[in-house]
Image (cartoon, rainbow, N blue to C red):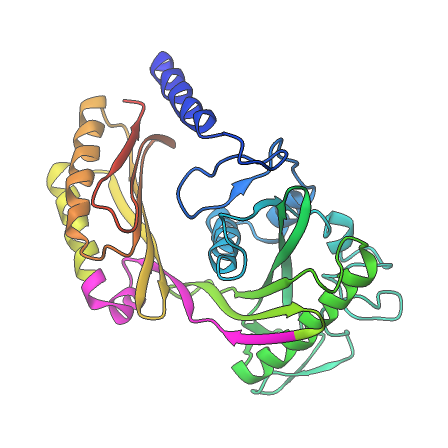
């Protein structure tokens, strides 16, 4: 098995490196798929990764925040024209709320004039009552777009709470959008004044990802955005939401997808039902599903059983009717991923990577 796993890893790495050809820009490479962004190599990790993990423990949510920001950024920054770096400007020290001189995630106070959360004595109007010391902004993600070593733009993801205070008072849309406008403009002004590379002509796209309550079927999503360039700004509402599968929220959002997901689960149950669980999450843009991620978790299965599950999953993906959605299936046994299936939007073909 170990040799087989090594073989799969080598194959995967070969596919990745074979796709890495020069596109004329120093340090850039070809993206792994069409209409996706390429990272600038060698990739420079940011120390903000530690901050992100500490603030949001759920790995899936962190991935959804960053990949969702990439998807939204395609409206303003074409993957054909730019490649990305991450957190080049807003590093750990810039975000750290314990740093009185900066601390963007901290509260606004005399020794932290750049804090983006309301002051501890400030009354924030939620639309459902006022809250003192409301913690609205949780984290900040940053993607930096480059072409030929020149900064072409920046995308910022503001991760926010949808309720604040000890009583979890929900923030109404009007009050939340007012806060986001003020906060976004303050952040843009801060970056332009602090970093020489960030001039007024460099466009900055800021989106707000609203975290969902833990006791709901919703997993959150992007709700609002602002685009800033040359001292002008444009704001827009975003109708995006991740929901658990299966769930009441899914059946309400799309009865058709709920039925198709249920049929997919039934197909897997017919193969091997004991100690095998199928759950997922779906990303909706308005009423349309854009992504569906399915996790098949098993325990103590044989190689033959796992192959049967993978084959059934591949065949059953045809039961999802939308061709505008990207489908991903991960098959895990005892904590080890043995197979991944992917069907891209606009295609009926299923790509399979397996160590079995």
Quarter placement of the N terminus: top left
Which quadrant of the figure has residue 129?
bottom right
Give x and y (percent) for residue 96.
Answer: 75, 54
Front residue (pair 205, 79)? 79
| Residue 213 in sight from this viewpoint | no
Q: Is residue 235 magenta?
A: yes
Q: In screen coordinates, is 2 left or right of 168?
A: left
Front residue (pair 47, 181)? 181
**Residue 326 vertical placement versus 329 (above, below):** below
Quarter placement of the C terminus: top left
Give x and y (percent) for residue 353.
Answer: 31, 29
Q: Write the residue at 28% across / 67% down.
A: 248
Give x and y (percent) for residue 89.
Answer: 73, 50
All told, the count of numbered labels is 0
Which quadrant of the figure has residue 190?
bottom right
Q: In screen coordinates, is 280 left or right of 273?
A: right
What segment is highlighted magenta in the picture?
233-257
Of all residues, the one furthest to the front in this rendering is 24
Q: In screen coordinates, is 206 left or right of 289?
A: right
Of all residues, the one furthest to the top in this rendering is 3
Q: Write the residue at 47% across / 25% down.
A: 17
Q: Write the residue at 30% across / 46% down.
A: 344
Q: Write the residue at 77% across / 74% down.
A: 119
Q: Is residue 329 magenta?
A: no
């Amino acid at each position: 098995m170990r040799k087989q796993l090594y073989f799969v890893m080598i194959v995967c790495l070969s596919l990745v490196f074979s796709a890495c050809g020069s596109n004329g820009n120093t340090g850039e490479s070809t993206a792994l798929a069409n209409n996706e962004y390429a990272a600038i190599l060698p990739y420079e990790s940011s120390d903000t990764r530690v901050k992100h993990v500490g603030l949001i423990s759920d790995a899936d949510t962190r991935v959804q925040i960053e990949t969702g920001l990439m998807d939204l950024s395609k409206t303003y920054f074409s993957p054909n024209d730019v490649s990305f770096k991450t957190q080049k400007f807003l590093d750990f020290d810039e975000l750290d709320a314990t740093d009185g001189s900066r601390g963007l995630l901290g509260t606004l106070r005399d020794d932290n004039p750049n804090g983006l959360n309301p002051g501890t004595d400030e009354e924030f109007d939620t639309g459902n009552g006022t809250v003192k010391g409301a913690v609205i902004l949780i984290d900040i993600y940053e993607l930096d777009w480059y072409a030929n070593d020149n900064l072409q733009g920046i995308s910022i993801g503001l991760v926010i709470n949808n309720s604040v205070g000890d009583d979890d008072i929900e923030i109404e849309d009007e009050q939340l959008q007012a806060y986001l406008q003020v906060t976004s403009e303050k952040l843009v002004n801060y970056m332009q004044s602090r970093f020489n590379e960030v001039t007024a002509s460099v466009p900055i796209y800021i989106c707000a990802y609203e975290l969902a309550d833990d006791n709901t079927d919703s997993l959150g999503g992007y709700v609002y955005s602002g685009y800033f360039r040359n001292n002008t700004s444009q704001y827009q509402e975003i109708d995006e939401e991740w929901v658990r599968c299966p769930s009441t929220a899914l059946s309400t959002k799309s009865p058709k997808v709920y039925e198709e997901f249920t049929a997919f689960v039934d197909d897997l149950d017919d193969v091997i039902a004991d100690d095998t669980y199928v759950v997922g999450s779906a990303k909706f843009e308005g009423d349309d599903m854009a992504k569906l991620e399915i996790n098949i978790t098993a325990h103590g299965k044989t190689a033959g059983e796992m192959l049967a599950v993978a084959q059934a999953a591949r065949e059953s993906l045809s039961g999802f009717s939308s061709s505008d959605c990207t489908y991903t299936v991960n098959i895990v046994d005892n904590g080890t991923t043995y197979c991944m299936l992917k069907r891209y939007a606009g295609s009926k073909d299923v790509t399979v990577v397996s160590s079995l």
